[in-house]
Image (tube, rainbow, N blue to C red):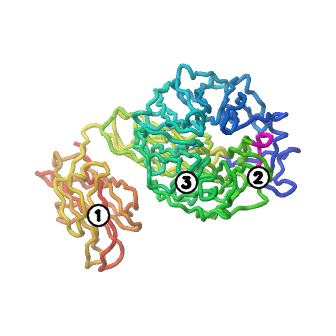
Amino acid sequence: MFRSVPLVAAPVVLGLCPWFCASVSADGLQFVEETSTRFPQPNPTEYTNQATIGDIDGDGDLDIIFANGGNFSSQGPISTQRVYINNGSGVFTDESAERLGFSGWCRGVELGDIDDDGDLDMIFAQDFNKLPHLFTNNGSGFFTDVTATQLPNITLSSSRAQFGDVDNDGDLDIYITSGSSNRFGCGQYRLYLNDGDGFFTDETATHLPIGNVCNNMDCIFGDIDGDFDLDVKTAGTGSNNSRLYRNDGTGVFTLVTDIPSDNSCYSYDFGDINGDGDFDLLGINAGSGSTELLLENDGTGVFTNISDQISPNLSLDDNDSKFFDYDNDGDLDLVVARLGSGGERIYNNDGNGNFTQVDNVMQVISDSSLDIMVADLTGNGKLDILTAQGESGNFENRIYINNGPADTIAPNIVRTEQLKDTDDNVGPYVVRVVIYDQMTSDRGFFDHGVTLNYSVEAGPVQEVPMKWSGNSLWRGEIPGQPEGGTITYFVTALDSADNLGVGDDLFFNVGGGAETTVVADSFTVLRGFYLSGALEDTFESDDAYLKFNPGITLAPTEPPVWLIFDGTLPSDVPTSLSVRLEASANTPGLTQTVEMFNWGTGQFEEVDASGASFGADSVVTVDVSANILDYVEVGTGFVRSRIGWRQTGIIFLYPWTISIDQVVWIVEE
């Protein structure tokens, strides 16, 4: 397919200005505090629990929302929730009164488009047995309180609420934590499902494990097992009050028990620390003796404690963290928010998930950071740092400007959902994608657009905007295709520095006309050891497998797994014929061959030779219509395909497995 993707200029750093655009600070620090010149003065000294960042007014820059309200465990005075509007260069104006006008006892705040109108709406999580508050955006960054009409009337003592499409229906749902009289009590966490228009129903009883969880501090969505749905991790203080819940794809969650325990966690953050394409976890203060807990994911949602890869892993009063690539070397480094003397800490990643603390990178200010975020707040392609202050000290939220390298690394299109062939001509065909970039947040990275590109029968490339579904997951829909055909698609993503990431080409077939899928009547094992499965497991692409181990071969040209599949077409004079194979191997580097039997010569002829897929299934569809009269037996419509897998060597018993999901012939009369 001809791939027409946007041409994007490299990030440009604007000309120097006298008071903030120096390429390096006078004392050589990369991150320098500039609160007094960038935040409203006098800076409000309010007990801030969390901040969130997003372009709420649609002008192309990132604004800030602060969730305020104390005290630590007892209810303090009511607090104004702050809205800071960016002028585009990282100078902020307090417009809380005119845009929001809300006061409360808020521990958390998050942004998301709940009504599919293209702007960011907002939810505040309140403590002390009060209602969370939901606000809709008018598109220009002015908010209306819709709590009474669009949110369940349930008071909670909550530290955090998150938006995410848990049931893959295209709208954002809400997961929210709760205690009892305050966040340190025990309560039932809740799930509110969206009807598509931003009206929410409490579906906790049918979708979440029932039972109280104590001392709620945090919750975060993330796809832990690569199945394109949102699982959820929660954090709680006290021994083993954190939880991991796995999503079955419909928004029904079950408790995951085989995860290393934590001791007392304030927050969790997902990030791919070693570049293997899955989400690892960092729990702040969750390790032994109030150290950090670093967990490595094996790709299936099974985690191993690798906390010894943080050096030094200090026992301090830390409260939050974010992964980000501060040195632009392609891996995720780490910044940790600390309460107390010594300031925040930055750790450098060696690329393999080994973190070493580095000094003289960020200005050291002793304060009481409860939350930390990274984002390009000045519009120059560099990730700046924001901290939110509470609990002790003078509660002055701070901004640190990045004088180091700009982000020049494109987003990584980690996984794009492979759609199965279908006879549904109506559609739409839903595609989900996982995308990582050089930073993390509860909403993944700050994008400048994620696009689903597709073409039908190698025609012009068409574009569909993809919608954010939660953390690093996006969702798009290809319209139905009444005439059918082969649809090729790929994803592109722009980050906040306008670096362009381009995903792999994938394709699927939509039935149209007289196209028919023919399954095998039988199969014959020429070489290999049968492990499990049946012929019926090859009829559909449904993850039901026919599995084999290799046998012994005496000739280097003969594969150690060699199977023949026989089928009967509805006619011996089809107009087109393709053979389709979906299979995978549990080891890399295998050769996979597909052959068709020539009824005229009585010999097999190779029609495809490609590398076998390692891990996930790959699909090979070979059009053999050019020689269709040779491959279909006259009078019977019989077809025969031979499929083989091999490595190098002559006599060897190979310790690998082939899993066959589908072998079919696709014909058109």
Q: How many marks?
A: 3
Residue that lies at the very extreme toward the top in this rendered image: 149
Q: Disc 3 and disc 1: Cα gap in Å? A: 56 Å
Res 465 visible: no
Vertical comparison of 67 with 530: above or below: above
Secondary-structure class at tag 3: loop
Which residue is rendered at x = 41% and y = 42% of the image?
Answer: 249
Secondary-structure class at tag 1: strand
**Residue type indicated by callout 1:** Glu
Which residue is rendered at x = 68% and y = 24% of the image?
Answer: 102
Give how far across and how far down residue 272 sits, in percent: 56, 55
Q: Are marks 3 and 1 in contact (CB under 8 Å)?
A: no
Q: Nearer the viewer, residue 577 or 119?
A: 119
Verify whether residue 398 appears in magenta.
yes
The C terminus appears in which quarter of the rendering? top left
Count neighbours of disc 2 (C-alpha within 10 A) and say few if under 14, some if 14 to 19, many if 20 or more. some
Residue 61 image-quadrant placement: top right
Give how far across and how far down residue 211 sits, in percent: 45, 39
Q: Is residue 617 left or right of residue 57?
A: left
Residue 247 image-quadrant placement: top left
Report the disc number at residue 262.
3
Q: Nearer the viewer, residue 346 or 161?
A: 161
**Span colored in magenta:** 392-402
Q: Is residue 637 left or right of residue 176?
A: left
**Residue type indicated by callout 3:** Asp
Res 31 visible: yes
Report the disc number at residue 606.
1
Q: Disc 1 and disc 2: Cα gap in Å? A: 65 Å
Verify whether residue 297 appears in magenta.
no
